[in-house]
Amino acid sequence: MRIAAFILSDVRSGSTLLDQCLGAHTDVVTLGEAHWLPAYVMRDRTQYDPVHELVCACGLAVAECPFWRNVGRELGRPLETLRLHSGFVRSSREVGLVAKVRYLPRRIVRSQPRLYRLPVVRRALGGARLARDILELLEAASRASGCPVCVDSSKSPFRFRAAYGLDRGRARAIVLARDFRAVVHSKMKRGESLEAAARGWRVALAQIDALIRDLPANQVHRLRYEDLCSEPRAELARLCEFLQIPFQDAMLRRPEKAQLHHIGGSPSKFDESRHEIVLDRAYEGAFTAADVTRMRGIIGSEARRWSY
């Protein structure tokens, strides 16, 4: 593996689309939201309970998928033994006072994400094993596929920072942002309030900024979902330059599902009728001027940072 690339974003921001575009490149293997891999291997919905089946994007169970079986052989140990989740989102299984106390250090770091740039903090929160397991998985996937670039779209900046702390030479951040109105609209359709959805957008982008701000320019690539959909050739060519691979026209269409082996992500990846890169404008007209003013009041400077 020459490059381990991590897509960082809020949810509902187009990471699955970007993952699919990258996965169409012959030099890139994409894993989707790799932090859910143990849940997929064991078909354990107490760990992760999406609306879609816990199967690889190719349609097979992870335990039966030839790609993932090859990854396991390259890894040399069972996939479910990997620790791939940062622990900064509490599991539904963690309840009660003891769980709250155990989670308290992570809650503090979530609110002050710059602390996670400190090696001593990462070590105290299990970052050393997390980084080792993430990079071993990506390396195994690279060997199994023969691709020099491996992409993880789990979105967590804490996972990326742990991996970067262990291997600065190979870890790269791809930061993806989407108009907060579109993200809030999508989250509200799934039951969140306007306030919670807007606050989540602000927190996600602020955490990402705090954990990449000190990185060299050649290790961070920023793009907006709207630009990717409006000018896909130009944006994907820039991204390929960042990843040190040549642009390929195949990236301009979502590949057939048999070509990809993602886990997690949007259920849109199972829709075989969706091949074109199309800008989703469903949020337009969904909010009143007062709604937008409320959102801007919650989001503040993060919107201006991305020109939204």
Image (cartoon, rainbow, N blue to C red):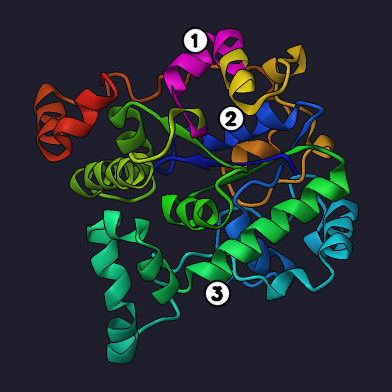
Reading the image, the residue beneath label 3 is 46
The stretch in magenta equals: 219-236
Residue 287 percent coordinates (x, y): 21, 26
The reply to whether residue 54 is visible in this rendering is: no
Residue 16 percent coordinates (x, y): 58, 37
| Residue at 26% over, 19% down | 307
Reading the image, the residue beneath label 2 is 18
Q: Gap between marks 2 and 3, in whole Å? A: 28 Å
Mark closer to the observer (2, 3): 2
Q: How many labels does the image show?
A: 3
Q: Is residue 201 above or below residue 26?
A: below
Magenta stretch secondary structure, dominant:
helix
Q: What residue type is labelled 2?
A: Leu
Answer left or right for 202 relative to 297: right
Task: Tell me which numbered mark, 2 or 3, is placed earlier along the sequence.
Answer: 2
Q: Is residue 137 magenta?
A: no
Task: Tell me which numbered mark, 3 or 1, is placed earlier along the sequence.
Answer: 3
The image quadrant that residue 20 belongs to is: top right
**Residue 43 circle label:** none
Dot 2 falls on a residue whose secondary structure is: helix
Dot 1 falls on a residue whose secondary structure is: helix
Task: Tell me which numbered mark, 2 or 1, is placed earlier along the sequence.
Answer: 2
Reading the image, the residue beneath label 1 is 230
The image quadrant that residue 251 belongs to is: top right
| Residue at 70% over, 25% down | 254
Dot 3 falls on a residue whose secondary structure is: loop
Residue density around tag 3, few if under 14, some if 14–19, many if 20 or more, within 10 Å: few
Residue density around tag 2, few if under 14, some if 14–19, many if 20 or more, within 10 Å: many
